[in-house]
Structure formats: structure tokens, C-alpha cells
Amino acid sequence: MNDSIKSLCLEFTLGTTGQAVIFLPGLQGTPMELGSIPKQVEKLGHTICHPRIEGYSAQTGVSDYEDWLAQLNHMVDLLYQDHQAVAIVGLSMGATLGLAYEAEHQKCVSITTLSPVLAYDGWNVSPFYPLLYFIFKFGIRNWHYKESEPYGLRNLEVRRRVAKQVLTQETTEVGSASLSAKHLYQGLRLIRFAKSILSEIQTDLLVISSIDDDVTSPHTAELIQREVKSALRKLVWLGNSYHIITLDNEREIVVNETVEFIEMNFQKSKSYQTYSDEAKELLIRSRFSD
């Protein structure tokens, strides 16, 4: 089974705890976007999985957002064949994809959303950006949106490094150097879908966002907090980062908060399972004794 999972992943490391974490970068992104979070999760003995989602992951063509969700669901089901618990960590549109998935399927023990996007209304986004949805609908589709300064980064050193990558590479450590109209259109469709079913989410939820995000305003994090039905929903605000918080000035905070949240929920899930197994055993003994 592990071989079949590996064939569907960009990166996969089998752990020893029976618990797995799926990592979702931004639209047309790569595992590099998640920074050091996967490595820290791997050190705890958990399985880490970066699924290759056709049409969503970098350089995999184009497909509808419904296909992204279906492929993600297939990966979760495969992991549950050999694992007791699965968590999702998503960045940017990956966070939006994770929210939409959990709202629809409700299978994971926790969702961590890093800079989730439910609107492109950050300070560096053109006020005409929302019109792209209608421009595409009316048939103007052969264009690309090219990434530009500050590339979601407040940290000048990392920003300069990414600026050099954009000049020579199709894919940088913050994602693809440009996004096609077809990808952006599906991203906007995913946002609409996620917003429509946010209230279905009951899984423990961590949201980490920057108050100075250049891509999406604080309204997204506030909307999520207000709409979801999770008994545990934690919101962490950052004050010295832009959108790609996994690589920016406060990346250590992001790593620590994320890993702590994942570990807490895995331990809670394990305790519930132990309690359930013990309760079943007591019930069986009681029946036999009667």
C-alpha cells in the first residue's frame, strides 16, 4: 500500500506512530513552500505526505477544483488504510482546499490553515482582481498572472532570493512564477465553494494569518472563526510577515504553533481511541459475565 501512496506523492515519508499529515502548498505550488514544518513533523515519527494533485500541483496541467477535492479524498482514504489519524496542513490556496475538503468529508482529526484565502483583498492586490472571474466567464482566457514584488515576503533576504528565481525558473520556493487564467478561475471557484460550506466544519482548527498579508485581508481569518462549528478553533495573528508566513520573518512561530497543534490533536485522537477500545472490552466482558 505504501508503494501506491508514494506513486501519488511529490514527497512521502512513512512514520512509525500510525498518524499522518498531508501538506498542501499554494495553487501550482511545491513542497518547498511549507518551509521546515514537514521536517519537524517527520522528527516526531509521523508520516508526511505531499500529494501530487493533478491540475493543482505545479506543472501538472489544469483541472477543475472538484477534481482536486476528489484526489485529496482518495489520498486521505489510502492513508487511513494504514493509519489511525490524518491531519491536514495547508498554505494559502492549500489552506482553502483543506477547509473545503474537511467541510465536505469530515474525515481528519485537525486542520491547520496558514494564510487561508477566501478573498483576494490584500493591500497588494489590484481592486480589479475580482473581475477576473467574470472576464474568464466571458471567454477571455489566454492570459497569465505573473508574480511580482514582494512575492508574499516581508523578509528582504528571502525576497531577493525569490526575485532571482522568478527570472530563470518556472517554479520558485514560493510557488509558480506565473499562474494561468484557467488556474485562477478554478481557484476562485474553490473559494466560492469553501465559503458556502464553512459552517459544516467541526474538526479542531488552527488559523495562522498575518495582519499585514499582501494577498488577503484579515477578514478571511475572521470569517473562518465566525462560521466554523469547531469546538476548538485557535487563531494566531502575526505582525511582521506578509502572505508566505512559512518562509517569512515569523516562520519559527508558525512552525512551533503548527507542530504543537498537530501533536496535541494526535494525542487527543489516540486517547479517544484507547478509551473507546477499553469501553468495548468492558462491554464484552459484561455481556459474558451476565
Image: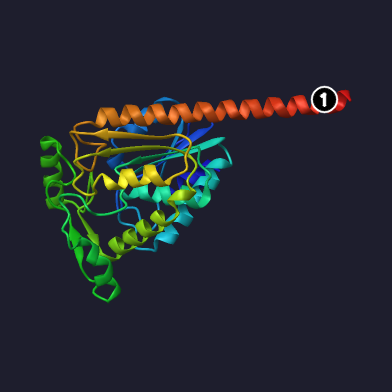
In the image, taking residue 129 as reference, residue 60 lies left or right, namely right
| Count of all numbered marks drawn on residues in the image | 1
Visible in this render: residue 285?
A: yes
Q: Quadrant of residue 180?
A: bottom left
Instruction: Locate residue 253: give its quadrant.
Output: top left
Q: Callout 1: 10 Å neighbours few (<14), some, many (20+)?
A: few
Specify whether 11 is left or right of 20: left
Q: Secondary structure beneath disc 1?
A: helix
Task: From the top left corner, tell me how far across and down residue 161 is, in percent.
Answer: 13, 40
| Whole-percent x, y for residue 237 in the image | 27, 34
Q: Nearer the viewer, residue 287 or 165?
A: 287
Where residue 20 appears, as percent x and y from the top left, is 48, 36
Left or right of 19 in this view: 130: left
Measured as percent of width and height from the top left, residue 222 is found at: 32, 43
Residue at image mark 1: 286
Work out whether residue 110 or residue 180 is closer to the camera in this orientation and state it: 110
Which image quarter holds the N terminus?
A: top right
**Hey, which residue is sitting farthest right in the picture?**
290
Q: Nearer the viewer, residue 260 or 195?
A: 195
Q: Is residue 182 above or below residue 157?
A: below
Q: Amino acid at mark 1?
A: Ser
